[in-house]
Amino acid sequence: MDRNLALEFVRVTEAAAILSAGWMGRGDRNAADQAAVDAMRKALDKIDVRGTVVIGEGERDEAPMLYIGEKFGCGGPQSPAIDVALDPLEGTNLCALGHSNALSVIAVAEEGKFLHAPDTYMDKIAVGPEMKGRIHYGMSTQEIIKEVAKARSKSVSEVTVTILERDRHKDLIQSVRQMGC
C-alpha cells in the first residue's frame, strides 16, 4: 500500500479515538461509540479511494456503526478500490467507565481480499512482519507463541501476549499464563 494512503488510515483511527475520548468516564457507551463512528466516517470520506466497509461492528447489538456494504471515500474511477474491516471504538465500556485500553482499529486491503464473514465472531491474531510464512490458520495459540519465541530467539516466558479481557477469553488467558507468557 502507498505510504501516504497508509498514513491517511492512521488519521482515520486517530480521529475516532480523539472524538470518543471526549466521552471517557461519562458513563455513556453509546455516545462514545457514536462519536467514534461519526469521526471515522467523516475521515474516511476525505480519502482519495473508492472504499467499502466489508467487516464492521454494530449489527448484533444495534450499536452505532459503519455498516457492511457502506461506501466511503472521495475517489474517482482511477482511485484505488479498497475494502476495510473496522471498529471505531473497541472497548466502549472501557471508554465509558474511564478505563484504559479502548482503541480504534482498521484493517485495509485491496478490493475483494477480505473474507466475507458478516455477523460472525472470529479468533484473530496480529504478529509482526518477521512472522510472515511462519504461522498459519489451524495452529494453536501455544504453537504460535512458540514460533514467535523461536523467530525472535527468545524463551516463551519473554513473549508478551495481549488479549482483550472478555469472559469468552478466560480459558485463553489462563492457557497463555500457564505457558509463562
Image (cartoon, helix red, strand yellow):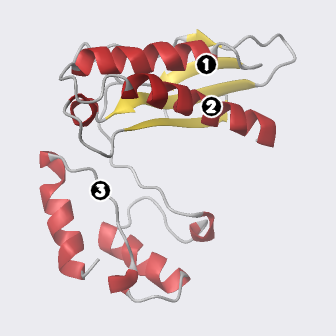
Quadrant assignment, res 21: top left
Which residue lies under the disc numbered 1? 43
Question: In what quadrant of the picture does the N terminus appear?
Answer: top right
Residue plotted at (38% across, 61% down): 138
Question: In what quadrant of the picture does the C terminus appear?
Answer: bottom left
Is residue 176 shown left or right of residue 78? left
Do callouts 1 and 2 mark residues in contact (Cβ within 8 Å)? yes
Task: Residue 114: tell me if it is visible.
Answer: no
In the rendered image, residue 78, in percent from the top left (x then y), is placed at 87, 17
Q: Whole-Å distance between the Cαs marked 1 and 3?
A: 28 Å
For residue 163, the mark is 3
Q: Is residue 3 depicted above or below 150 in this figure? A: above
Is residue 157 shown left or right of residue 135? left
The residue most toward the right is 78
Task: Residue 156: tell me if it is visible.
Answer: yes
Of mark 2 and mark 3, the one earlier in the sequence is 2
Residue plotted at (57% across, 69% down): 131
Of mark 1 and mark 2, the one earlier in the sequence is 2
Kind of residue at badge 1: Ala
Residue plotted at (20% across, 50% down): 165
Which residue lies under the disc numbered 2? 11
Residue 148 or 89: which is nearer the viewer?
89
Kind of residue at badge 3: Ile
Q: Is residue 72 depicted above or below 18 in this figure? A: above
Is residue 146 shown left or right of residue 133? left
